Every structure is written in C-alpha cells, then in structure tokens.
Image (cartoon, grey):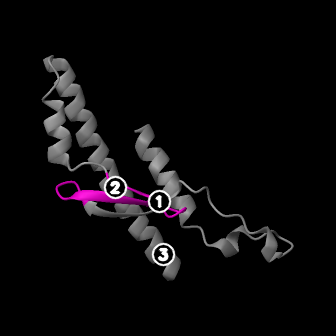
Amino acid sequence: MTLLRTLLVAALVSTVPAVALVSAAGSASSVVAPPGDTIVEITGDAANGFEIEHYDGTSIYPPTDSEALAECREYDRRVARVRCRTEVLTWYRDLAATQQALEWAHQAGTA
C-alpha cells in the first residue's frame, strides 16, 4: 500500500501545472520543477510490459508479469514463492492504478 501511495503522490505532483507553482508575487523565475524521478507517464500493461517515464526523461521497463512470476518459481520454499507472487501481483495492480490516475489527472489538466 505504501508503494501505491508513493506512486499516486508522485503522479499527482507531476501533473500540477507550473503556473500553480509560481509564487504569490507572480515571479515566473520562481517556478519549481518537480524532482527528476517524478513519474509523468506509464504506458503498457502487465502482460506486455510497462514503461515508466520520469520527469527527467529517464524510463524504466519492469519485466512482464509472466517473466516476474517465472522468477518467483525459482525460490526453493513454498512460502517464498507465494510471497514473491503476491508482491508481483500487487506491483502490477498498483502500476495499473497509477497509470489510470495519471490519465485522469492529465485529462483534468486539459479541461
């Protein structure tokens, strides 16, 4: 849940228009850019792979869900395999939720 909360906060921060960040004095020189690792877009899906783009232009590509789950099968103990599968499924569920939140935030910013 902490990961989801972190990703959603990052997504919301990344969609705040720069105009809203101008100081009360109206000085355009005081515009504050978000941190470089702020997520600005997520494309793809769990089956085909996600691309996570950051404000600084970097991107990461987590493995597909089937690749991640295959790695979980390499654990010796059943408890470790179950824990791994649960983490993978939670990660991809949270990525999809963040992707949807970003899409809504971008639509709201253009309305």
SS state under label 2: helix
Indicate the position of residue 105 as horizontal and vertical percent values.
47, 69
Q: Earlier in the sequence, mark 3 or mark 2?
A: 2
Q: Is residue 20 magenta?
A: no
89 lies left or right of 58: left
Q: Is residue 39 above or below residue 19?
A: above
Q: Check the picture and name the quadrant holding the N terminus.
A: top left
- From the viewer's side, name the closer residue of 31 and 21: 31
SS state under label 1: loop
Tell me the amino acid under the disc marked 2: Ala
51 lies left or right of 47: right
Residue closest to the far front: 58
Residue topped by disc 3: 108
Residue topped by disc 1: 58
Q: Which residue is at 74% across, 69% downward?
A: 31
18 lies left or right of 88: right
Give the magenta range: 45-61
Q: Earlier in the sequence, mark 2 or mark 1?
A: 1
Q: Which mark is residue 97?
A: 2
Marks 3/1 in contact by CB < 8 Å: the verdict is no
Indicate the position of residue 8 as horizontal and vertical percent values.
46, 53
Tell me the amino acid under the disc marked 3: Ala
SS state under label 3: helix
Q: Residues within 10 Å of mark 2 (few under 14, many from 20)?
A: some
